[in-house]
Image (cartoon, rainbow, N blue to C red):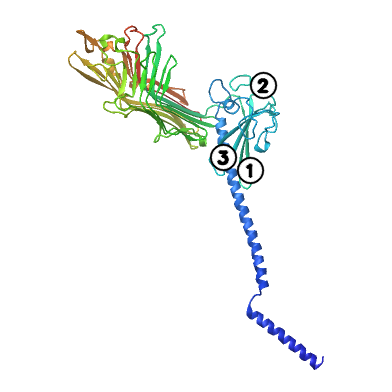
Amino acid sequence: MSPTARSFVGRLAARHLARHRDRDDEGFTLVEIMVAMIVFALFVSAALGMLVGALRTAALTKDSTSARQVAQADFEKLKGLVFQASGSTPTVLSTYYPNLTATSTRGTTGYVSAASTTRWTADGDPATGAFYRTVLTSAPTAPAYTRYLAVQFVDSSGVAIATIPATYSPTALPLPSTTVRATETVLWNRIGQHTYTMQSELTTGAAAPEQASGSATITAVRLSGLDAIANPLAPVKVALEGPSLSLRGALTDNAVASVAASGADGTNSLGAHSEGSTGLANAPGDTTASSTSASAGTLAGSGVTPYGTFGPSTTSGLSAQASYARPRVSTSSAPSTTTLAAGNGSTPALTMTTLTTVSDAPAKLQLSSTDIARATIPSCGGCTTFTSTGYLSSADNGITHSVDASVSTTGAAGIGLFPTSFAPQGVVILQLDSATLTCHVGGTYPSTSPGTVTATYSGSIKYWTGNGTTGSYTTVALSNSNSTSPLAGISLATTQVWTYAGAPVYLSDYISSWGSATTSALSGMKQSTPNDQLLSAKLDGFITVTTAGVQATAPTTSSLTAQLGIVACSGADAR
């Protein structure tokens, strides 16, 4: 290479090195930065995609789990129903296959024939056969679920029956089949539509035996009588009662529980009916009924005068649970409750009469009112006079098992019978301060311990004694500790109440009989199997009084009966 060429190459290399030194001093070029940003963006995009996908999968999994729980709860309700029965009892067929009234619109309740064009398999409708679609109330979850329950008759091979006879009735035989297939589809939208499907078959086969059960009922007061004035040969039956509770729970192949309450209820054999507040809770599908209240009411009579009246009433705390295979109704600390109160002012909580006027009664009774029976708290308007409560519990922790059914009542008012001018509150006043009945069964696996029935009460009867000038009440205390009834020693025929036309009037002119529960009577209520796996108890009143005839024209057929504390309970545990 010539000296000139070598000089040129040296100068070129020097300039190249200088440029690289300058660039190193200046940092990254714009192109390098852009390339780095693109690489970073690609990485972040991929990571975000994975994160969004994971969140979406988690949300869909949560939705599917909730949908399954909703469907399971619906199927528990379905399996808790009797398959088919006559009358108005809710059954599988009367609730979910009630008729053959066709629906012509997608997603609506109604019958779908085998040839119908309103079959939507995308909504979970069966692909073949006739069926009845029920749109269930939307579940209170997010997202909102749409729920369709399709019920169709199937033959012994499980094939859907195509033709349902036009004579089909859910309450009558014959049926198209003794087996139905129920398919529930839960639909929801979250980035597209999703579904969850659950299916089960139900049959008219014999019900599974009860593993455990319990029940209890209570009515605080019942007044009943006969009106024989209009037709002595066919007197009108009259009854007025309240507040009342009825609760039950059972465990077979699934658990069920229910409680019903009534603040007041009146009927007569002419067809009249009047009621106060009512409440109801059923499980499966653990429920708590809303509290209810009702104003005062009357029970119509055969004439202008009503047979009875009752004050305002309420129900509260009615709760039925069947989850975890343990039927329960409320709790001992928060029981189902129903009350009956006196009306505002001087309105009694309960009255009962079969008289149109005072002159319909024998004159010697000297009644000051047509009310034969009256429940009041003097100088207290709106006060609660009677309260009935109850609960049912069941337990099974794998070691011990038990069922308890219990009802109670308290009374702040007495039932005054025969108000007169000399005894305005009544010649006889019955009062049940408190009463309780409990049935208990259970034991430790693998056996059952002796069951128990526990009944307690306290109350009193006051009766007027006088000589026609002065008089006063005699009080007789009554309770479950009485070995004999204190009322047994009181002679109705010789105990003078007052005078009429110069002649004595006795308790027997007003009262035909009375009685109270004793220790032996309460202990003798228990009826049970030898191993106490099943027991029951029943009492038609801790305190009872039957009057003499209250109608002058029908002295032997017009009595009235007052019963305080009508109770019953049962328990069974074969686990």
User: Residue 530, position in %: x, y?
Assistant: 46, 23
Q: Amino acid at mark 1?
A: His
Real-space Cα distance between discs 3 and 2? 35 Å
The residue located at (40%, 10%) in the rendering is 235
Per the image, the residue denoted by label 1 is 194
Q: State which quadrant residue 467 falls in.
A: top left
Q: Secondary structure at mark 1?
A: strand
For the residue carrying disc 1, how many other residues have a C-alpha within 10 Å: few (<14), some (14-19), or many (20+)? some
Which mark is on residue 165?
2
- Left or right, 488 with respect to 52, comes to left
Q: Residue furthest right?
A: 1
* Quadrant of the image containing the N terminus: bottom right
Q: Which one is in front in this view, the residue at disc 1 or the one at disc 3?
A: 1
Q: Amino acid at mark 3?
A: Gln
> Is residue 177 among what the camera can see?
yes
Q: Judge whether 359 appears above or below 172 on screen.
A: above
User: Residue 288, position in %: x, y?
Assistant: 46, 35
Q: Secondary structure at mark 3?
A: helix
Per the image, the residue denoted by label 3 is 69
Real-space Cα distance between discs 2 and 1? 35 Å
Which mark is on residue 4?
none
Q: Judge whether 23 appears above or below 51 on screen.
A: below
For the residue carrying disc 2, how many other residues have a C-alpha within 10 Å: few (<14), some (14-19), or many (20+)? few
Q: Residue furthest left?
A: 469
Q: Amino acid at mark 2?
A: Pro
Real-space Cα distance between discs 1 and 3? 15 Å
> Is residue 337 among what the camera can see?
no
Lower sequence index among marks 3 and 2: 3
- Left or right, 136 with respect to 344, comes to right
